[in-house]
Amino acid sequence: MLDMERIPKHVAIVMDGNGRWADKRLLPKMAGHNAGMKAMKEIVKCADQFGVKYLTVYAFSTENWKRSVEEVSGIFKLIVVYVDSELKELNENNVNVSVLGDYSMLPAESVERLDRAIETTKDNTGLRFNIALNYGGRDEIRRSVTAIAHEVKAGTLKPEEITEETIAANLWTGKRHADIPDPDLVIRTSGEKRLSNYLLWQSAYSEFVITDTLWPDFGPEKFKDCIEEFQSRKRRFGGR
Ligand code: FPP
């Protein structure tokens, strides 16, 4: 049974297994991503219903550019399809969309849809839905260090004034960008036990739940199981 009093505030998901889902059905890889997008739609609604405040999904990593041109452009096209079909409902449901990552180098139509989704929902006070796009944990730490180095060079910050908060503030999740708390729970589907450069800094004390379910098959029941697993854990944050 879900304890509605102890719902994780921020859930981050590595949506893995779209390719294997398609392979099992002798379908092209894009059919897997398409099914993955549908699963994502359902989990956004479900997260909202469960009372999760922040949902962050890993849609495209800084390493995913190594995939074939067809697959990369197919995923970017899905962003257009997703925003066109869902923005109205997301907005009606008071969902606030943001992107973690530099999405400016995506195709113009994807950038335009993302800008529209962010702009349309910017004053919404419900679920914060964050899409990690062209996102890499090491890349964002590097960007934070660069921003801090500029401040030190300009003389507005002393090296000894740099704290963990300074570094965190300059991450995509930080006060100077999306301003969202660290994830309480990180879910990875399809059985892989890796973080894959996802929220490296932010997941320092997150609980991890790995499920064998392939992402396109991940539905509300599986999501509930993952939250129950989270609720069975004791979090100590390095204390006793
Ligand atoms: C990993 O599965 C999945 C991705 C790299 C892409 C995830 C993208 C979506 C779910 C599309 C929807 C996104 C938006 C924002 C509209 P994989 O291909 O690595 O699976 P495999 O390990 O089985 O090959």
Image: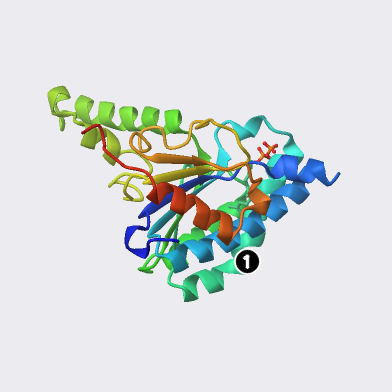
The answer to whether residue 128 of the structure is visible from this angle is: yes
> Which class describes the residues within 10 Å of circle 1: few (<14), some (14-19), or many (20+)?
few
Q: What residue did someone put label 1 on? A: 84
Q: Is residue 32 above or below residue 147?
A: below
Q: Residue flagged by tag 1: what amino acid is it?
A: Asp
Across and down, in percent, residue 132 comes to 50, 45
Q: Is residue 95 above or below residue 197?
A: below
Q: Secondary structure at mark 1?
A: helix
Q: What scheme was used to colour the molecule?
A: rainbow
The answer to whether residue 103 of the structure is visible from this angle is: no
In the current view of this chain or complex, which residue is farthest to the right?
26
| The quarter of the displayed image where residue 188 is located | top right
- Give the camera-side residue of 199 and 149: 199
Across and down, in percent, residue 184 comes to 36, 46
Circle count = 1
Q: Is residue 109 above or below residue 236?
A: below
The residue positioned 83% from the left and 47% from the top of the image is 25
Quarter of the rendered image showing ligand 1:
top right
Q: Is residue 201 above or below residue 47?
A: above
The residue positioned 38% from the left and 37% from the top of the image is 203
Across and down, in percent, residue 224 comes to 50, 57
Relative placement, left or right, of 237 versus 30 is left
User: In which quadrant of the rendered image does the C terminus lie?
Assistant: top left
The residue positioned 45% from the left and 53% from the top of the image is 227
Across and down, in percent, residue 52 comes to 40, 60
